[in-house]
Image (tube, rainbow, N blue to C red):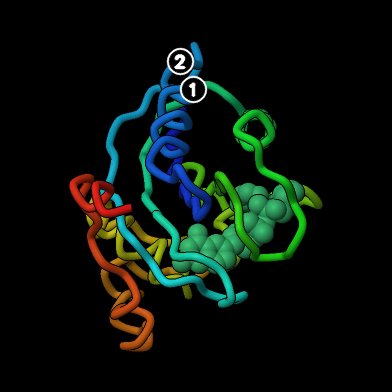
Amino acid sequence: MNKAYLALGTNIEPRIQYLESCLYELSKHPDISIINQSSIYQTVPVGYTDQADFLNMVIEIKTTLASLELLDYCQQLERELGRERKIRFGPRTIDLDILLYNQENNKTERLIIPHPRMHERAFVLIPLNEIAPDIVIPVKEKRVADLIEELPGNDIKGVAIWTKNESADE
Ligand SMILES: Nc1ncnc2c1ncn2[C@@H]1O[C@H](COP(=O)(O)OP(=O)(O)OP(=O)(O)O)[C@@H](O)[C@H]1O
Ligand SMILES: Nc1nc2c(c(=O)[nH]1)N=C(CO)CN2
């Protein structure tokens, strides 16, 4: 059995429904069990900034799928949930990234583990810290909680816990 952490992101409405559908589809897969999930965070866009705020979260799964099979399923779900790739780092209905797969450090053409940008992303590290503060990120050889200390303060300020009640205003 393998343990993996996945990052979910969405910034096209209805954002909460995209997250919920994605979690449901993952949980329905016979070879995937969701073990733990972070809160949902509302985050300012990073990279390409002229777009709506994101909802981000991180989950821990157990799976018998190999890492490339897991990537295939993540990409299938992105397609099924209507993601169109237009702008790099641009708006998306759902983005599903594999952050960690066991303690692997693996680089192939299609898949890099750990995710190459995870250590610099507050929108990934802050939710991950909620469910796995002590996990050591291969390559960086640092704990999640320690990587957060290295983030710029402004990045951290751009991440706020989001509660479902806020959707009433949307
Ligand atoms: N750990 C990983 N998780 C998901 N995709 C990955 C990973 N490593 C490499 N990739 C590759 O990255 C490609 C681009 O992924 P995607 O379109 O989701 O990027 P993005 O969401 O725009 O940017 P980012 O990867 O920085 O979040 C995918 O086709 C996939 O093959
Ligand atoms: N806040 C936030 N910014 C982003 C995100 C994301 O999920 N959240 N995803 C990106 C490309 O993967 C680019 N920028």
Q: Is residue 90 left or right of residue 160?
A: right
Q: Position of residue 70 (x, y in %)?
A: 60, 32
Q: Is residue 167 visible?
A: yes
**51, above or below 108, in the image:** below
Q: Is residue 103 left or right of residue 115?
A: left
**102, above or below 87, in the image:** above
Q: Is residue 112 visible?
A: no
Query: On the rendered image, what quadrant is the N terminus found in?
Result: top left
Residue lying farthest to the top in this orientation: 30
Identify which residue is drawn at 29% across, 40% down: 37
Q: Position of residue 11 (x, y in %)?
A: 50, 55
- Foreground pick, 80 / 125: 80
- Foreground pick, 21 / 70: 21
- Identify the residue under disc 1: 25
- Identify the residue under disc 2: 28
Residue type of the residue flagged with mark 2 = Lys
Determine whether the residue tagged by mark 1 lies in a helix, strand or loop: helix
As measured in the structure, the alpha-carbon distance from the residue carrying label 1 to the one carrying label 2 is 5 Å
Classed neighbour count for the residue bearing mark 2: other residues with Cα under 10 Å, few (<14), some (14–19), many (≥20): few
- Foreground pick, 27 / 113: 27
Determine whether the residue tagged by mark 2 lies in a helix, strand or loop: helix
Q: Position of residue 124 (x, y in %)?
A: 41, 61
Identify which residue is drawn at 42% across, 39% down: 19
**13, above or below 162, in the image:** above
* Contact, mark 1 vs mark 2 (Cβ under 8 Å): yes
Q: Position of residue 73 (x, y in %)?
A: 63, 28
Identify which residue is drawn at 58% across, 24% down: 65
Whether ligand 1 has any atom under 8 Å from the Cβ at mark 1 is answered as: no
Identify which residue is drawn at 57% across, 45% down: 93
